[in-house]
Image (cartoon, rainbow, N blue to C red):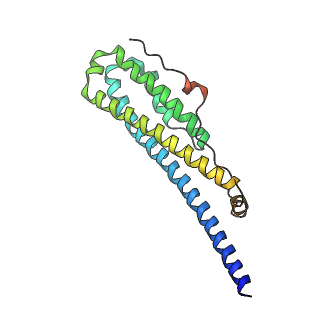
Amino acid sequence: MVWILVVIAIILVLIIALYNHLIRLNIRCKNAWSQIDNQLKRRADLIPNLVEVTKGYASYESKVLTDVVNARNKATTISEMAKNSEEVSDKLNKLLALSESYPDLKANEVFKNLQIELTGTEDKIAFARQFYNDTVQHYNTAIAVFPNNIMAKIMKYGEKEYFKVNDNEKEVVRVEL
């Protein structure tokens, strides 16, 4: 009788440990996603300032400026946010390339500071993406292996989507001086 109670206690402890492990991984994925979201928000907050500074110097380049603002306002799902993120990055590269055509803009301290902030934010976004994808990989692996897969099915946990970029963002950006 004691052996049966010990076996039941061990099984119960294992079930609780598996459950807690999957909960921790799920929460970690949510946290990693919120880090990407925070950095995208930071970039979105910097863009209007950069656009306003640039407008004063490049008034006839309004299409590039409106493209940047419009690109940052889209997206709901992870894949849409990934696509939107690369579109915003592309538009920002075009906006920053405008500074080459306007020496006064390039020399403007506010523009320089915003450009530095934006570059730092882009680096943080890249790091947050990598951290998120590493976390999702760990989570997806955990819910696929035995005995976690049984607990994951009971908890209705499915695979999480990676933050992917398309082939356009993988291309080398050419800068002509």
Q: Residue at x 71, y 87 (%)?
A: 2
Q: Residue at x 43, y 26 (%)?
A: 65
Judge whether residue 48 can be spotted in this image. Answer: no
Q: Residue at x 68, y 63 (%)?
A: 155
Which quadrant, please, contains the C terminus? top left
Name the side, left or right, on which 60 lies relative to 172.
left
Nearest the eye: 151 or 147: 147
Which quadrant, please, contains the N terminus? bottom right
Query: Residue 115's image quarter?
Result: top left
Q: Is residue 3 above or below residue 77?
A: below
Q: Position of residue 173 (x, y in %)?
A: 49, 20
Name the side, left or right, on which 114 lies relative to 165.
left
Q: Position of residue 18 (x, y in %)?
A: 64, 65
Q: Position of residue 39 (x, y in %)?
A: 44, 42
Please identify the residue farthest to the bottom as the structure is shown: 1
Please identify the residue farthest to the front as the structure is shown: 3
Name the side, left or right, on which 157 lies relative to 100.
right
The total number of labels drawn is: 0
Please identify the residue farthest to the top as the structure is shown: 177
Q: Position of residue 70 (x, y in %)?
A: 50, 32
Q: Residue at x 56, y 60 (%)?
A: 24
Nearest the eye: 100 or 167: 167
Judge whether residue 143 can be spotted in this image. Answer: yes
Q: Is residue 114 above or below residue 26?
A: above
Query: Residue 80's image quarter?
Result: top right
